[in-house]
Image (cartoon, grey):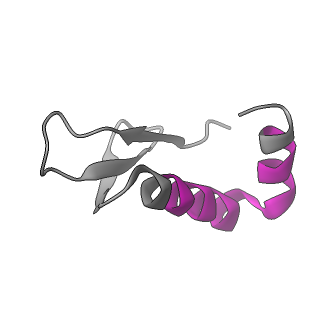
Amino acid sequence: MRRNTFAVYKPPSEGLPYLAVMVLPSGRAAVEPFPTLAAAEQHNRQLEAKLYGERRIRAQDWRGR
């Protein structure tokens, strides 16, 4: 089973937001803007935990994700 991929894109210029992106196996993407890198990363971690469960996320973080 293929899983969604999560990424955070830094703004290309000042004044633009960081983008938290979830790419689905179909190639479609869901994007949300955030004012800080930390907020975008936290959003992706929370969304991934909601979709796949806390145990998987903690194991990845431990491995230096």
Magenta span contains residue 55: yes
The residues colored magenta run 41-60
The residue at 14%/43% (across/down) is 14
Q: In which quadrant of the rendered view does residue 51 lie?
A: bottom right
Q: Quadrant of the C terminus?
A: top right
Q: How many marks?
A: 0
Which residue appears farthest toward the front when viewing the image?
14
The residue lying toward the viewer, choosing from 39 and 7, is: 39
Position of 15 relative to 3 (above/below): below
Taking 16 as reference, is 19 left or right?
right
Position of 31 relative to 14 (above/below): below
The residue at 31%/49% (across/down) is 19
Taking 28 as reference, is 13 left or right?
left
Magenta span contains residue 14: no
Residue 58 spot, x, y in % from top left? 83, 51
Residue 57 spot, x, y in % from top left? 77, 51
For the stretch drawn in magenta, the main secondary structure is helix
Taking 24 as reference, is 27 left or right?
left
Residue 17 spot, x, y in % from top left? 22, 53
Q: In which quadrant of the rendered view does residue 4 lie?
A: top right
